[in-house]
Amino acid sequence: MNAKLYIVKILSILLLVITVTSACGEGSLSDASSDSGSSASTTLYLCDNGEAKDLTLECEAESNAYSYANLYPKYPNTQVDFNYVLDGDIQGTSYTFGLWLASGGKTTFDVSIIIQNSSNETVIATTSFTATSNDFSLFTETLEGIDPETAKGDVLVLRIFPASGDPGALVTKSDPEGNSYITIPTTK
């Protein structure tokens, strides 16, 4: 009986050693893979508080409250810009758009992420979405843009322009739908 108990203890210790060793090995592998390729990202929410249209790390809507911008393709200068002041250099090329859009019929929205520094503007990612419903729908797309050289104080601009069609709208924050957002590579 003592021999069986001794064997069970030895097997338990071996199992523990194998588990700890493999957990340490996995940790090392995951650390190495995270250093070598995947870059972190930052989600910025469209926050419309009257005159101020900003991209922020948080923008809460009250229950059943909506904040939106109406956009009219037939009138000039109906684009809307949301701004975010960068704290360093963007480190990557993957950009995601998640916009709640609607249309009075059919509206094509041109959407661009732009870097402003001094008097220069550089488009780093751009796409288009076509809304065909009066109900707000979430339009998402992840795409490869460019990795610009940016510095602390440069302004990242999300520009939404109604390129053609009928009047449309963009929900910036709502409950229960959620916030429109973009995801950009983290800055350093």
Image (tube, grey):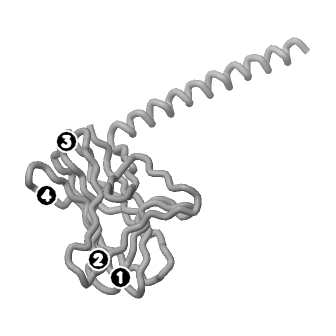
User: From the image, which quarter does the N terminus lie in?
Assistant: top right
Residue on which the image places disc 1: 167
Image: 22 above or below 175: above
The residue shown at (43%, 77%) is 102
Q: Which amino acid does label 3 sit on?
A: Gly
Find disc 2 in the rendering and name its residue. Answer: 162
Query: Total label count?
Result: 4
Amino acid on which disc 1 is placed: Pro
- Mark 1 and mark 3 lie on one chain; the one further toward the N terminus is 3
Q: Check disc 1: other Cα within 10 Å, few if <14, some if 14-19, many if 20+.
A: some
Q: Nearer the viewer, residue 103 or 5?
A: 103
What's the distance in space between the residues labelled 1 and 4, CA to CA?
Answer: 27 Å
Q: Picture quarter containing residue 63?
A: bottom right
* Image marks 2 and 1: residues in contact by CB distance under 8 Å: yes
Q: Which amino acid does label 4 sit on?
A: Glu
Answer whether labels 1 and 3 touch (C-beta < 8 Å): no
Horizontally, is 93 left or right of 22 in the view? left
- What kind of element bears circle 3? loop
Q: How crowded is mark 4: few (under 14 residues within 10 Å), some or many (20 or more)?
A: few
Q: CB of mark 3 within 8 Å of CB of mark 4?
A: no
User: As drawn, is 61 to the left or to the right of 158?
Assistant: right
Q: How far apart are marks 2 and 1 (CA)?
A: 8 Å
Q: Which of 171 and 9 is in front in this view?
A: 171
Q: Is mark 4 on a helix, strand or loop?
A: strand
**For discs 1 and 3, the disc positioned in front in the rendered view:** 1
Taking the spot 45% from the left edge, 30% from the top edge, the residue there is 28
Q: Which residue lies furthest to the front in this view?
A: 50
